[in-house]
Image: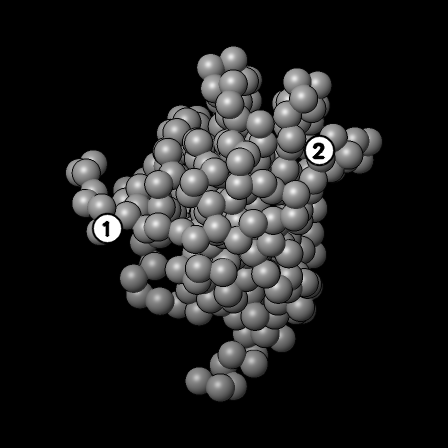
Amino acid sequence: MGSLTEDEVIVYSPVQPEGNSREENVGIFIDYDNVYWTLMNNHKHNPNSNESEKNIFEKLWNTYGRENVRTFKAYADFDKVDTNLTSLQKKRVQIRHVYSNGKDEDKRKNSSDIELSIDVIESTYRELNINRYVIVTADSDMIPLVSRLMYKGKIVDLYYLEDAVSDGKNNITTYANNFYNLYDFLGLSIIEYKAEEYVDAAIGIIYNWSLETRNQDFALGYKILINTLEKNLNVPTNTTKEIISILEKNNHILDEDKKTSKGTYKGKILNLESEKVKEVISEELSVK
């Protein structure tokens, strides 16, 4: 990665939050892997947005100020997240690449939260001047870390995702000095997606996919199905998975072993005996 000239580096003017003194030394640590996937899978929002007001890095710089921040680190498997690393470098973010096991998101294991916790605890011994820690997370596993920082007399500002940090028993916000909901911080409008409202459209998309000549030698595998529905319906990944679950539960789609020129692969096909499928196909044919 090449070095940047001074003109290329973004400089931020701080907007001081309540209780944040200019004499404070701030350390910012983002569990970017968890935050990224939670926002993308639930709300189709990239936290490194092109809109400054919705960009988590720019918002944090503007909140705490360049003259106060002593370290600013983001932890993720950057081979998987859709983020321009050069843009992060220009924002003066220290990138901590943490390898994941490479599986699909719902089965993938990532140790970004562990690496972050280790770095934070080590910094309390190496960088004694840091007295305010900013922890950004979508994981209730951060409770021990936040609690430890409090015991060490540090000020903890917690930025969290409300639908991801509570394990039903403990709420991580009770362990921090200050806490801020990322949805409010980034000014996100939360859209409530109802999977059942997309069932007819999903059946139509699958039907048209099966008719395309270029798809005749392919099986409609689960991953292809998710990508196809997500793209055409413009809904988040988790909503897409709910739609597929409804289709399966109601026997609108079935499993098949499809023979292709490259071998036999498992895929999904429409159940032509389903009354709902018959109805949707009839409507599709009527408009062709």
In this view, which residue lies farthest toward the bottom?
287
Please name the amino acid that badge 1 sits on. Glu
Which of the 4 image quadrants contains residue 251?
bottom right
Residue bearing the label numbered 2 = 176
Residue bearing the label numbered 1 = 8
Residue at image location 64% in from the left, 38% down from the top: 158
Q: Between residue 151 and residue 196, name the one nearer to us.
A: 151
Depicted 4 relative to depicted 143: above or below: below
Left or right placement of residue 69 versus residue 212 in this view: right
**How many callouts does the rendering have?**
2
Q: Earlier in the sequence, mark 2 or mark 1?
A: 1
Q: Between residue 186 and residue 197, name the one nearer to us.
A: 186
Depicted 202 relative to depicted 143: above or below: below
How far across and down, in percent of the image, does residue 175 sit? 74, 30
How far across and down, in percent of the image, does residue 16 sit? 56, 49
How far across and down, in percent of the image, does residue 88 sit? 35, 44
Residue 1 visible in the shown view: yes
Depicted 215 relative to depicted 171: above or below: below
Residue at image location 28% in from the left, 48% down from the top: 9
Please name the amino acid that badge 2 sits on. Ala
Residue 259 visible in the shown view: no
* Element on which disc 2 rests: loop
